Image (cartoon, helix red, strand yellow):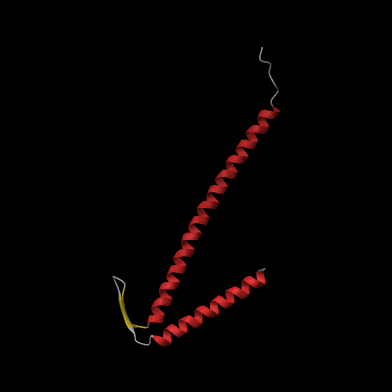
Amino acid sequence: MATLRRILLAALSIALMLLAAVLAYSNPTPIDVDIGFVKFERVSVALALAVVFVAGWVFGLLTVAFTLWRSATDKRRLERSLRHAEAELSTLRAAPLQDAH
């Protein structure tokens, strides 16, 4: 299964590189990119799209990392609460029973 996943990932990577090469070849005219506070002049379309793709990928990784961090924090908190509850339960089980008279 892992081998198939690696083959598919390699094939996808090669396909994306070929697509980027075709895009760069078919759009040789440089463009100006204005991102609000900085203006880049004479940038190739392929480079601009590659930078935007990588920036989106990094943003996605940061978003997932933040979500995983919050999940791990919640898990640690719940495990601590479970340990306290188990300790209290074992204390209650060890206590002698008292008559209700």
**Which residue is located at x 59 percent, y 43 percent?**
80
From the viewer's perspective, is 20 left or right of 8? Answer: left
Q: Nearer the viewer, residue 24 or 54?
A: 24
Mark count: 0
If the image is split into quadrants, where does the N terminus sit?
A: bottom right
Q: Is residue 73 visible?
A: yes
Determine whether 75 is above or below 85 in the image: below
Q: Is residue 41 visible?
A: no
**Which residue is located at x 61 percent, y 40 percent?**
82
The spot of residue 46 in percent (x, y) is 41, 81
If the image is split into quadrants, where does the C terminus sit?
A: top right
From the viewer's perspective, is 59 left or right of 100? Answer: left
Determine whether 43 is above or below 89 in the image: below
**Which residue is located at x 42 percent, y 85 percent?**
24
The spot of residue 56 in percent (x, y) is 43, 68
**Which residue is located at x 47 percent, y 62 percent?**
62
Determine whether 99 is above or below 42 in the image: above
The spot of residue 3 in percent (x, y) is 66, 72
Q: Nearer the viewer, residue 55 or 6?
A: 6
